[in-house]
Amino acid sequence: MSKLVIRNIGLLLSGKMEKPILDADCIIAVDGKIVAIGKAADMDLSGAETVVDAKGVTLAPGLIDSHIHPVIGDYTPRQQQLSWIDSTLNGGVTTMISAGEVHLPGRPKDIVGLKALAIASQRWYENFRPSGVKVHAGAPVIEQGLEEHDFKEMADAGVKLLGEVGLGTVKDGPTAKKMVDWARKYGMQSTIHTGGPSIPGSGLIDADVVLEAGTDVIGHINGGHSALPDDQIVCLCESCQAGLEIVHNGNERAALLTLNTARELKQLDRVILGTDGPAGSGVQPLGILRMIAMLSSLGNVPAEIAFCFGTGNTARQRELDVGLIEEGYCADFVLMDQAQHAPGKTILESVELGNLPGVGMTIIDGKVTSRRSRNTPPAGDIPLIEGE
């Protein structure tokens, strides 16, 4: 067995809105899964293959980006950029979820081709994790002509996601609902494009279409890039129970409107975060951290709750075994500290003032995957691996 011990944790964020801070200073993982959380003085730390001295910094579940558009490996032709996923790992993100592999040059739109692309995308990210990051991909963009047996075929082959409804030729509510229902029948989660067109070929998807389609997630409810009118955003929040996905590439004012509406409804647990990159706005390695700091500072949300938007809320919405500090969950962590010379007495207060923390280490499945981040501001303290 491979045993990991992380001791001397200064602050432990759980990812759970109902209890965002845990009274613990140590975590033990075996074979990539969390097996114990508590006080080091009361735990068996012997026999560890790796011992991390957290040096009193904060540990949180690895961040989750709920909305990306990958293509293949760690390359995006959209921005002609290599190693964008590795760069995002340096922003604390350990899991990414595709909303469609739409930027593949010559993306097939015929039924046979789109199914083949979905299955291939699912396979190559299952077989290859860029820098260790878990990329859930293979998200077909639905087109006119798909039938129920096509969804069963893709699901049987391992496809578990639908790309953004509306990016293909299916843009009307009745057709979208029929296909979303077929996908759900075979265990596939769905997301819908929301707002104005983002790429040539996409179109306006308004509140009526979103509600009729009935997807699991309202993709970029704050627009990707152009948001819907305020009354439609409020209507979406009030009229369904789908995940409310706020993205970095969207309208920040609309993001705050969504946050405030969800709070009034006492449904902050529906708020999840994505970047919607790579896209015209580029690649955002620190996008999830920036969204957490923005929503906390401008939306008057305690930082420990804002971190849940990018961890546990998404994990629960997406039915993942990451994103929560809980026994049996994957040992995927980000260790971070208040940035050097950043205002605020603590890391949480600093984030509530709009500042990014400094990432000192990421861990995926109990293995250290990155050390001091090359992208965040430098952390005050950095975790160490004992014996190095």
Image (cartoon, rainbow, N blue to C red):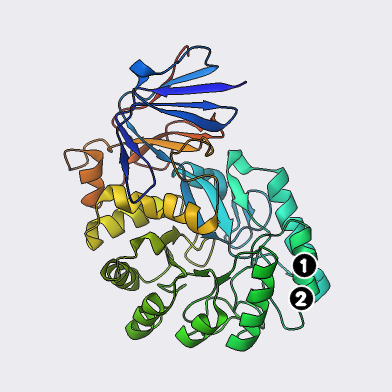
Q: Is any atom of residue 172 visible in this view?
A: no
Residue 113 versus residue 5 in the image, above or below: below
Instruction: State how many labels appear.
Output: 2
SS at circle 2: helix
Q: Is residue 283 left or right of residue 178?
A: left
Q: Residue at x 44, y 45 (%)?
A: 91
292 and 197: which is toward the camera: 292
- Please, what is the three-letter code of the amino acid marked with disc 1? Lys
The circle on residue 148 is: 2
Q: Position of residue 110 (x, y in %)?
A: 79, 76
The quarter of the picture where the N terminus appears is top right
- Residue that protrudes farthest toward the right in the picture: 112
Q: Position of residue 238 (x, y in %)?
A: 36, 78
Q: Residue at x 36, y 57 (%)?
A: 291
Q: Residue at x 28, y 66 (%)?
A: 263
The circle on residue 152 is: 1
Q: Residue at x 71, y 67 (%)?
A: 105
Q: Is residue 74 left or right of residue 358?
A: right
280 and 72: which is toward the camera: 72
- Please, what is the three-letter code of the amino acid marked with disc 2? Glu
Q: Is any atom of residue 36 visible in this view?
A: yes
Q: Is residue 167 left or right of residue 147?
A: left
**Would you say the residues marked 1 and 2 are in contact, meaning their CB atoms lie under 8 Å apart?**
yes
Q: Position of residue 233 (x, y in %)?
A: 37, 79
Q: Is residue 25 left or right of residue 106?
A: left
Determine the CA span between mark 1 and mark 2: 7 Å
